[in-house]
Image (cartoon, rainbow, N blue to C red):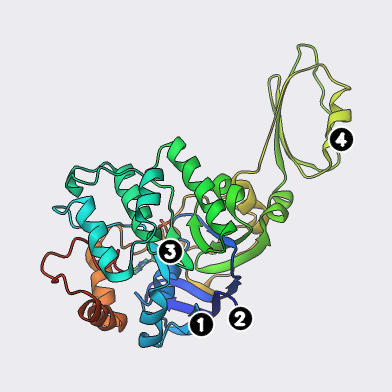
Amino acid sequence: MGTIDVDGLTKDYGEVLGANDLAFTVEEGEIFGFLGPNGAGKTTTIRLLLGLLEPTAGTARVLGADIRDERALIEAKRRIGYLPADLGFEEKSTGRRVLEYFGSIRGDSRREELLELFTPPLDREIREYSSGNRQMLALVQAFMHDPDLVIMDEPTSGLDPLKQERLLEFLRDERDRGTTIFFSSHVLSEVRRVCDRVGILREGRLVALEDVEALLDRGGKQVRLRLAEGENEFEPIDGATDLERAGRSVTFTYTGEYNALLSHLTSYDVLDVEIDEPSLETIFMHYYGTTDEGSDAAATGDRDEPTADGPATDERGEPAADKRDDPAADERNESTTDSGSESRAEERRSTDDSGAENRPRSEETDA
Ligand SMILES: Nc1ncnc2c1ncn2[C@@H]1O[C@H](COP(=O)(O)OP(=O)(O)OP(=O)(O)O)[C@@H](O)[C@H]1O
């Protein structure tokens, strides 16, 4: 049994399938990257795993607890850290009060150690925090009770490059201590730097589950050349696709061996060479024959199969209902379909003796 076992997990929002028959396992002690463009269903899946949304079909086990079993999930959550996409801290509270609150519920044995790495201004009110400071506070909150599993929704967002680097290094160290990390992202470069395996999600469906290296190999490398004046012809090499030439610049995607490429290039007068990892866009191109990066295409489930000609998207030209554009949508959804809300209230009652009135965080953060 894995740390997370997902089995046929489906969330039908009515208009769209936020998760469509997902099945995968996250093994103990790995960093699992959950990669997909905006609207692919990453947040939906995470919220299902934490009991914040009720599945339409299928289920998952998280640290052995069936997500449909409220009591078992509440118990499991004591060993889970969660960093949501929308942090939703109580704006008038200070960072210190937030941490004290969470510490009183779940423990804070690693708080001081984490505050050396991530440094939110603890005595200022959250409403004065920059987005990076909010993110750092959320990171301390997610890890300070030394959880066995940490689920993070786009954890690097808002962090400057130095802090992002620090976080990725920290995640590798956590993995080495045996913590299991489930981490959603739409940035391939960060996923490749820390994750052992990656699941690619598109329109609610898991379309690939791979070792990161295998994923990158398949996507090919992006090669850009600048040729010297007079180099008017460039013969494509085996393994090169999408070759384009503009003036003296040549670009192509290459899936062959480096040595073959380098010896091919010696036949030309080359002024400059850049070889980069494939973009998420290129990877999507590989898997779906389309570059739909960044779209918030609605998942219409088996109503539209992906084809070589184009995406399985909602072609009506209407934007899908999106909770970010309609904050009330989530609330409506939770109040009508989320049987977990009662259990969250119960969890607070049973663990929170600091009084609910001045709770320094939102429901979302308090997963
Ligand atoms: N409460 C909701 N009601 C209706 N549709 C929703 C709701 N929440 C999400 N959706 C839709 O479900 C799909 C998946 O959304 P989700 O937020 O899970 O994607 P995501 O991969 O996390 O995107 P992002 O990277 O932008 O956060 C989208 O089409 C979205 O518009």
**Which residue is located at x 21 percent, y 74 percent?**
352
Whether label 1 touches label 2, CB < 8 Å: yes
Circle 2 packing at 10 Å, graded few (<14), some (14-19), many (20+), is few
Foreground disc of the pair 4, 3: 3
Residue 97 in sight from this viewpoint: yes
Q: CA distance from mark 4 to mark 3?
A: 46 Å
Whether label 1 touches label 4, CB < 8 Å: no
Mark seen at residue 1: 2
Q: Please say if 311 is above or below 169.
A: below
Amino acid beneath label 4: Asn
Q: CA distance from mark 1 to mark 2?
A: 8 Å
Give the residue at the far left of this rendering.
357
The residue labelled by disc 1 is 64
Nearer-the-camera pick, 201 or 319: 201
Whether label 3 touches label 1, CB < 8 Å: no
Callout 1: SS: loop
Mark seen at residue 146: 3
Amino acid beneath label 3: Asp
The residue labelled by disc 4 is 259
Of callouts 4 and 2, the N-terminal one: 2
> Where is residue 341 shown, x and y percent of the image?
27, 79
Q: CA distance from mark 3 to mark 2?
A: 22 Å
Foreground disc of the pair 1, 4: 1
Q: CA distance from mark 3 to mark 1?
A: 18 Å
